[in-house]
Image (tube, rainbow, N blue to C red):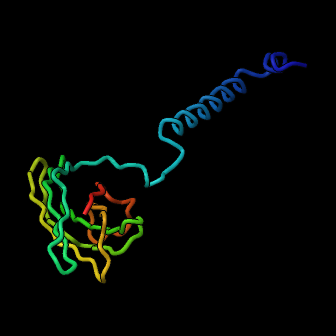
Amino acid sequence: MSFLDDWKEWSTAKKAISIIVVCCIGLIIVGLLIGGFSSDKNTSPDTTIKVSDLAISSSGYGGYDLTCKLVPDKDYSYLEAQVIFYDSDDAVIDKSPLVWNMNDVHANQTIKVNGNAYVSGDNNPAKAKVLFFDSSLNSEESDAIFTQEVDV
């Protein structure tokens, strides 16, 4: 007996329930395909800040100045910047967890960021990764709302 023969013998209610179940499964599959299968935080977030003229320069004795212009596309109650320093072999040599911060940041407001980071020891950084966060003392790189590497 084939599937079509079995289908003809089913009641209308049984056919309707089968069609509804198949449609629900189809919608779930389409939703997964559109939304993605992963909740991987390493995908780039919807950045709502624009950062320009980003630079890190030595101020001597292990100190480094972070400067840039920042323009948010939406209001934030809090923003902060962190810096991770790397040597020429891409090894992490130090982290500065709170280089700059500001409360009550408004959409389309131009902000001149000027922060201070430090590298301990005798290591000289070759590059740095600047991360902006919208919550205080966040340490997961994947939670950053903006990330960019710069040469030091």
**As drawn, is 88 to the left or to the right of 104?**
right
Residue 74, given in percent of the width and then of the height, sits at: 18, 49
Residue 71, given in percent of the width and then of the height, sits at: 14, 50
Q: Nearer the viewer, residue 93 or 39?
A: 93
For the point 37% across and 65% down, the residue is: 88
Identify the residue at the far right of this view. 1
Residue 67, given in percent of the width and then of the height, sits at: 14, 61
**As drawn, is 32 to the left or to the right of 1?**
left
Q: Quadrant of the C terminus?
A: bottom left
Relative height, residue 109 to residue 81 (above, below):
above
Identify the residue at the far bottom of this view. 121
Give the number of marks. 0
Relative height, residue 80 to residue 49 (above, below):
below
For the point 48% across and 51% down, the residue is: 39
Q: Quadrant of the N terminus?
A: top right
Residue 92, given in percent of the width and then of the height, sits at: 39, 71
**As drawn, is 137 to the left or to the right of 22?**
left
